[in-house]
Amino acid sequence: MERFKRYLAGQHTHTEMRWHLAIIVIVFWGLVLCARMGYETGRAYSIHEQMLSALGSFDERHNPQWFWIFTLAMVFCGTFLVPVTFYIHRRFRVISEWGARIGMCLFLLGCTGITFTGLFPDAHLKVFGDVSSSKIHGMMASLIIIGFFLGMILHGILLLKDKFREQTFAEGEASYWKFIGPYLVCAAVVGTTLSRIRWDYVYSAILSSGADAARYWHDAGQRLDHFPLLEHLAIWALTIYIVWFTILLPHEPAHEEQ
């Protein structure tokens, strides 16, 4: 029981955290693969044509029989990433107590988004009045992007701050630069996303107001809506980032709670 409580609080040893991350990756992607194998709608599932969320949709055009496997995968992933978030927080407190706390809250927001994205499938089912499950699904997916993207940026800023000032987080300059790897993986996805935005429409939206501005903002991102592969790339990149970044952290936090 004490070990279980320690794990819930993210007080893993470095080796235990490696196993924890391995379990997350194997179980999550294993369940996603099972959901994909059960995807039978008259056409083969393709990452170039269907969003990953289609595996969790019980609409007849998607995965009505095995959608619950994808739901299980998302709930499992979101839940098991919470201790990882606590683990990261305990190591960043030495740089900034408030910065580490904000980063933890952002990552927890992302974890919440993952869990509820699974609980509310991308399906045409009315949940609250005229609010559909699909709409809630989209809102929760936004939490994943906001939480993890801002969290990544904040942790990167904290690392740079410590590198050029106190250098209390890691030993030696090379210890800081090794973190560039996980960020380069995410930068590739961000770069792909930015390349598909219609910046001429963004410029027009900034200069406009009201309905015209809203229309321009919508048109600016139209090419993203028709690029399902981007969602897959983003999820793969997030998986790689969390695993790689967490493994690179110091094996022990700078100070323990007494």
Image: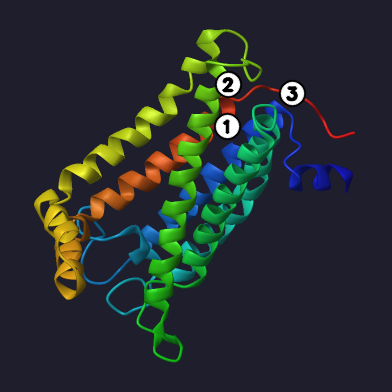
- What residue is shown with label 3? 254
Disc sitting over residue 39 in the figure: none
Question: In the figure, 125 relative to 56: above or below?
Answer: below
The residues tagged by marks 2 and 3 sit, at their Cα atoms, a distance apart of 13 Å
Question: In the figure, 121 relative to 27: above or below?
Answer: below
Q: Residue furthest left?
A: 200
Q: Is residue 128 left or right of residue 232?
A: right
Q: Position of residue 242 (x, y in %)?
A: 51, 37
Q: Residues within 10 Å of mark 3 (few under 14, many from 20)?
A: some
- What residue is shown with label 1? 246
Q: Dot 2 lies on which element?
A: helix
Q: Is residue 96 left or right of residue 125?
A: right
Q: Position of residue 174 (x, y in %)?
A: 51, 9
Q: Residues within 10 Å of mark 1 (few under 14, many from 20)?
A: many
Q: Position of residue 41 (x, y in %)?
A: 26, 72
- What residue is shown with label 2? 162
Residue 129 visible in the snapshot: yes
Q: Is residue 176 left or right of residue 82?
A: left
Residue type pointed to by label 2: Asp
Residue at the image point whose x is 41% and y is 52% from the top? 145
Q: Nearer the viewer, residue 3 or 150?
A: 150
